[in-house]
Image: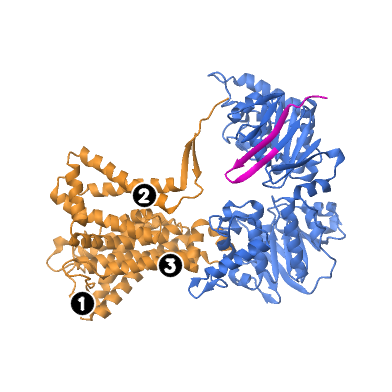
Amino acid sequence: MTSPIIEARKLYKSFGKVQANRDISFSVNGGELLCLFGENGAGKSTISACLTGLYPPDSGEILFKGKPLRMKSPAEAIRQGIGLVHQHFVLVPDFTVLENIVIGSEKSLVVQYEEAEKKLRHICANYGIEIDPNTLVRDLSVGEKQWAELLKALYFDADVLILDEPTATLDIENSKKLFRMIDKLKADGIALILISHFLDEVMQADRVAVLRHGAVVGIKRTAETTPEELTRMMVGRDLEPKLRDNSEVGEPRLVLENVTVEGSDQLLALNDVSMTIHHGEILGIAGVAGNGQNPLMEVISGIRTLASGRIILDGINIGGMNARKVKDMGLGHIPDDRFVAGLVPEMSIEENLILGDHRGLYADGALIDFGKMRLSAERAIKEFQISAPSSETPTGNLSGGNAQRVILAREIMLATKVLLANQPTRGLDVGVIEYIHKRLLEKRAQGVAVLIASSELEDLMNLCDRIGVLFQGRLMGIVDAQDTSLEEIGLLMAGQPLEVAA
Amino acid sequence: MIEIVPRKSTGWHTQVAAYLVALVLGFATSALLIKAGGASVAEGFGALYEGAFGSWEAVLQSLVAATPLIFTGLATVIAFRAEIWSIGQEGQMFAGAMCGYWVSLYLGGAPLLLAVPIIIFAAMIGGAFLGGFCGWLKTQFQVNEIISTVMLNYVIIYLLSYLLAGGPWTEEGSTSYHQTPVLADNFHLPLLVDGVKLHLGFILALVAAAICWVILKKTPLGFEIRALGFNPTALRFKGVNVTRTVLVVMGLSGALSAMAGVSEIFGVNYRLRGDVMVGLGFTGIIVGMIGGLNPIGAVIAALLFGALANGSLYMSVLSDIPPSLVPAMQGILLLFFLSASVLVRYSIRIKRFTHV
């Protein structure tokens, strides 16, 4: 048996009162892929920061090729042969790929560009990376930028490569390509650590270390475990089965007739869209983001101007009504960008919870009723399991999941008739996603008409009664979630009308 | 590499200490400036103190000088809190004074109890209109408020020049002075004490500060003003009429600036002149900033600046130090206070960065 290339022994790391890592021990052999799997905030990124010298651990040690390793800076880690591929790009846009890699790493005064370029081209050829070292980073696509990040790590002959959620920005094709590259790296004897919370990626690793609340809950061989078991370990309990019953939907509740919205240029943001959502129905909108999902949600909630057509809520035409009136009729709207459209990050949880109702429900004469605000905030924090030091915590300090719970709390209390949810689970971990789905289904059971736009097709298939597809502002068709297939929806998303797709 | 890291929390006593240190350092730096000018520091500061706080009368006089600064400081607080960078306090102040004077021409022998409220009301309408106009330009045509407010300052000041330099408001026989005739007694803001021109305006300024505090802290409007400053998009998504909020903020800010004009013309000078009040609007911006964009803070800062302005008159008489040093001192104090306010919220660390 080979000895591990890198080994962590009883690592502890805390930031102030928060214990980010507790008693972390694991090892990775050459040619092996270990996955660190856990919810947002479980301590994955802290481990990678300790391994790459960004923070020294409070206690414990890191063994590298059998010897204890003490690093003072990330630069030293790279020199030792520990490379990190960042989740967010740390590239200078106006430099070429080559310059990005070489500059700052020169050992002599003069940069040896020719030599470096030769080495880089060799790496590219070896791993099948199609990228010209002399292109400006600015001109690269998102996927190519990810390759440039990877090249940066490979250039320094890393023995250990840490990949921090590398597929977060990649499409399916490029993700597959990345895993082919990972196989090649393994064959070359490199020890790989993958940080991820996507189950299908996790299952491609050799072993998985599951993290919860900063500690390793267990390390499993993927060959000997199942996705369900890993999820259970990560969340710390069984995921509840889907709640959706097949109860019949009721009368039409929200009706869109020939809704058209102007776009920024010649193109219409929404082009002649008609749909009906019934009492107790969830209608999903599939489609690549940017095909009219935001205009659709915003025109219904009265934020965008309706160019033509009618929007009818319980028999009343709300098309052209202002957003406050629409909201007061019982419409909740979870916008897609949490910290831009959903919350005021600098303001507290309690203040964000009354946003929009600060002149109505929470006003007492000319003043804001602070007692009422505090009381309802405390109730919401308990009911929606928002974990925060207090109701006065600024929402900008919350994790994505907790921030979304604040928005969820506010909008769900509001949505007595219609709930619009735009990408409600984007970027969140399994536990929160499950919770949000549960809440949406509760609304369905209460007879609310729910409209969800999501790029997670499988989620839509599980949640929705019917699924519509938007393509370039047009509704390509609406299909029954029970009788459709991923393939059919995929064709609609690519712009094939329903007649052809069916 | 220098890193700026937000501090977890600082108690109020740390903050007070930081501002006191800033005050001391500001005066120390000013002392260097006086020294460099060849004057005696002790003499200069002695005279400054004497002029600002030396006698009961001096203290009251300092309050008089602080009064317009409280108003323009509050105008700054209201606008800047909403992240609307209005620099129009100066023009709005003059506009307020002009509107007040204009209605006074029609009030004839009206009793004080009737005349003064009408004058105040007219001035506030004028200031609010001017501020609101810039708000309208901003919301309707995306005109940057910094540009529109600064340019309108000039429009108003030149309009006043026209009216006073041989125009319809010029006092007969005194074209060279650029001033209106003296106002009748029934238009003067009532004095609070005998012998010093501490007038009703000071009380109104304190009341205005209290109202601003309540608005910002306790009312739905204040909630919207704060949220607007941070993230207007989220407000729009919750159905708040952002356009209306901008107009209200600019109108309120303009009305407060206008009150500075009323208090100077109807409380101190008793006639409208082109060369009085100059700079009180711009100083109000510094006052608002030093006050941490907080109404109470603005009052404290205005009192400090009022004392400085009042003391400087005495200083220029008693010592060789030119009064023009006072604006320099105000600028120095602003720099130190802003530095202190940053240091209270953030800590600066120097990190060693090693190359590969």
Same chain assignment for discs 2 and 1: yes
Q: Are marks 1 and 3 in contact (CB under 8 Å)?
A: no
Q: Is residue A2 magenta?
A: yes
Chain identifier, orange in the render: B
Res. B19 mark = 2
Of the residues tagged 1 and 3, which is closer to the observer?
A: 3
Disc 1: which residue: B186
Looking at the rendering, the stretch of residues picked out in magenta corresponds to: A1-23
Amino acid type of the residue that numbered disc 3 sits on in the rendered structure:
Val
The color chain A is rendered in: blue
Give the SS element for disc 1.
helix
Query: Could you say which is closer to the camera, residue A125 or residue A184?
Result: A184
Q: Is residue B145 magenta?
A: no
Amino acid type of the residue that numbered disc 2 sits on in the rendered structure:
Tyr
Whether residue A145 can be seen here? no
Q: Residue at x 66, y 68 (%)?
A: A413
Whether residue A251 can be seen here? yes
Question: Residue A49, located in which quarter of the rendered image?
Answer: top right
Horizontal side of A132 relative to B336 (left or right) equals right
Q: x, y (%) of residue A179?
A: 78, 36
Disc 3: which residue: B214
Q: Are marks 2 and 1 in contact (CB under 8 Å)?
A: no
Q: Earlier in the sequence, mark 3 or mark 2?
A: 2
Disc 2 to disc 1, C-alpha distance: 43 Å
